[in-house]
Image (tube, rainbow, N blue to C red):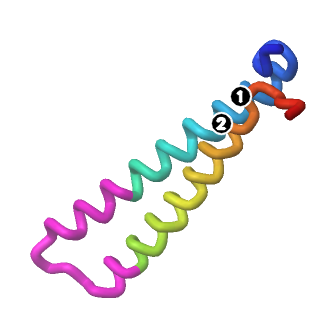
Amino acid sequence: MNVVAEHPSTNIALWREYRQAFADFARKARTVQSLKENAGLVRDSMDDALIELERARLYHNNCRDSLAAALLPNSDL
């Protein structure tokens, strides 16, 4: 059976959350890159940006895994 057909609203929500998580992760990665390129770098700003980037990465991974699990066919093995 097709999970997309079984739970379309759930899958749409998972896709939406995954895309938003990726966009947030990408935005925070750009922030870190921008801080790295700034000659007048403030250490605390970089530390905060790296922590936010790691949080965004973990959330993205969680969204990715949830979406992948929802798309896997049910197995009765």
Q: Which disc number belongs to residue 32?
A: none
The residue depicted at 65 percent of the width and 31 percent of the height is 15
- Residue 20 within the magenta-colored segment of the rendering: no
Q: In which quarter of the image is residue 9?
A: top right
Indicate left or right for 1 with 36 as reference: right
Q: Considering only vertical position in the picture, is 62 above or below 77?
A: below
User: In which quadrant is the C terminus drawn?
Assistant: top right
Residue at x 15% of width, y 70% of height? 38
Q: On the image, numbered disc 2 is attached to which residue?
A: 68
Q: Which image quarter holds the N terminus?
A: top right
Main SS of residues in magenta: helix
Q: Residue furthest left?
A: 39
Q: Within 10 Å of the Cα at label 1, are there few (<14), some (14-19), or many (20+) other Cα atoms?
A: some
Q: Distance between the residues labelled 2 and 1?
A: 5 Å
Using the rendered view, name the quadrant where residue 20 is placed: top right
* Image location of residue 67, percent across then percent down: 68, 37
- The quadrant in which residue 10 appears is top right
Tell whether label 1 touches label 2 (CB within 8 Å).
Answer: yes
2 or 20, which is in the foreground?
2
- Which residue was labeled with disc 1? 71
